[in-house]
Image: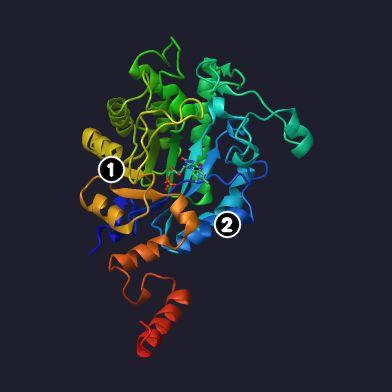
């Protein structure tokens, strides 16, 4: 029995296998509303056999969007566009999840194919998209050439924490059954966690405990608006890969604090706190972030998810079997092949007669396979 295709339970929610669709921003929303694009984009992963399908980074405040195309759950009117998507994913046997986030100093950015640079007057003339002022723990620009964000006041901090809770309530109404907080890749929660972006001297900055207070309060705010039986996960950047930044020991301590605040799983990514250049310490190879998932899982005694440069079914099977992570998340490989989980199951001998496929496809594929074998082609 392939471990990758064994069920996994967090609280009252059971995932049919260990494969998650990593959150992938599509930059196709209008005023934060989902549309047909998101329905098909996410729906095909449910048909493709993933156990957990995460909707992309979804802003808890309009100004917390990274780009004009980000999804949002900052108002009730956005619920009804997401609800059919969550329902479809559920009906096809996967768990619908959503990633809640706030971009902080990375807000007001151009979409990747428009340059990933700050929105400016050119965007107004070309796309009628105006720039807005970003907020952050400290008035430090994200990178060279970026505007200085406004330092968040105590009131701003309390408001954003409350917004996470309110968005969680809307996610529940939309039918999602797991939330992941985006506390990685240089977005707001990560900005509070990292000494590189957080230079505050009040109770929200300075010591490690103070820097993680925002993340912990976000977890508490969500928990107050999220069913007891539904899991809550956090995506952390387990290292900043930079001198003076977060190291894995900090991530383990944060994971422990989050666990105490009702968090059930840590999705372990890395990097993204400052600038576009890849830090020298960051060496990319298949599964290069898996050791972080393993260390956080061991060190904090919390289930973990491994992500980043994973595509080989046997590699994924081996890492789950070895207890390095409880789940794995794939992004680009699933863009290339939304049916990756079904194909991986076949590779690992867990998809006899196309049984895991939706019957509308599997029945025909099985017939074709039999015919191919009868006429000696397979
Ligand atoms: C199109 C695209 C959009 C992404 N958007 C998000 C996002 O909204 N939230 C997030 O946490 N990561 C995002 N990521 C990062 C992925 O979730 C994932 O961590 C990363 O791509 C590494 O996994 P991979 O090697 O399987 O692609 C995005 C990646 C891609 C390719």
Which residue: 24% across, 33% down?
300
Q: Residues within 10 Å of mark 1 (few under 14, many from 20)?
A: many
Q: Which residue position is annotated with label 2?
A: 39
In the picture, the quarter occupied by the C terminus is: bottom left
Judged left or right of residue 58, residue 228 is: left
Q: Residue 73 appears in which quarter of the rendering?
A: top right
Q: Position of residue 174 (x, y in %)?
A: 53, 50
Q: Which residue position is annotated with label 1?
A: 303
Q: Residue 16 appears in which quarter of the rendering?
A: bottom left
Which residue: 54% across, 23% down?
143
Q: Residues within 10 Å of mark 2 (few under 14, many from 20)?
A: some
Q: Position of residue 307 (x, y in %)?
A: 37, 44
Secondary element at image label 2: helix
Q: Position of residue 136 (x, y in %)?
A: 53, 21
Looking at this rendering, what residue extends furthest in the right direction? 125
Q: Position of residue 322 (x, y in %)?
A: 20, 49
Q: Is residue 296 visible?
A: yes
User: Which of pointers 2 and 1 lies earlier in the amino acid sequence?
Assistant: 2
């Amino acid at each position: 029995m392939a471990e990758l295709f064994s069920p996994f339970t967090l609280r009252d929610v059971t995932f049919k296998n260990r494969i998650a669709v990593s959150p992938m921003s599509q930059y196709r929303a209008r005023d934060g509303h989902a549309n047909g694009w998101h329905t098909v984009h996410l729906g095909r992963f449910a048909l493709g056999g993933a156990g957990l399908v995460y909707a992309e980074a979804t802003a808890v405040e309009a100004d917390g969007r990274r780009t004009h195309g980000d999804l949002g759950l900052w108002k009730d009117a956005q619920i009804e566009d997401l609800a059919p998507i969550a329902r479809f994913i559920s009906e096809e046997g996967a768990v619908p999840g959503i990633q809640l986030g706030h971009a902080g100093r990375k807000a007001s950015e151009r979409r990747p194919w428009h340059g990933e640079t700050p929105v400016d007057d050119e965007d107004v003339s070309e796309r009628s998209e105006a720039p807005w002022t970003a907020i952050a723990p400290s008035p430090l620009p994200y990178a060279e050439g970026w505007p200085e964000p406004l330092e968040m006041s105590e009131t701003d901090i309390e408001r954003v924490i409350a917004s996470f809770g309110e968005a969680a309530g809307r996610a529940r109404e939309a039918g999602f059954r797991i939330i992941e907080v985006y506390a990685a890749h240089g977005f707001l929660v990560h900005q509070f966690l990292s000494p590189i972006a957080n230079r505050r001297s009040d109770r929200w900055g300075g010591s490690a405990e103070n820097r993680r207070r925002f993340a912990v309060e976000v977890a508490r705010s969500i928990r107050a608006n999220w069913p007891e039986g539904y899991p809550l996960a956090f995506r952390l950047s387990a290292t900043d890969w930079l001198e003076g930044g977060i190291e894995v020991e900090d991530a383990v301590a944060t994971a422990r604090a989050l666990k105490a605040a009702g968090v059930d799983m840590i999705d372990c990514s890395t990097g993204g706190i400052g600038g576009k250049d890849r830090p020298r310490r960051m060496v990319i190879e298949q599964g290069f972030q898996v050791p972080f998932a393993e260390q956080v899982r061991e060190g904090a005694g919390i289930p973990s998810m491994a992500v980043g440069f994973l595509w080989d079914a046997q590699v994924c099977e081996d890492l789950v079997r070895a207890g390095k992570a409880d789940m794995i998340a794939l992004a680009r490989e699933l863009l290339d092949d939304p049916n990756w989980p079904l194909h991986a199951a076949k590779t690992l001998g867990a998809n006899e007669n196309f049984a895991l496929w939706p019957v509308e496809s599997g029945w025909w594929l099985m017939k074709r396979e039999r015919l191919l074998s009868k006429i000696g082609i397979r």
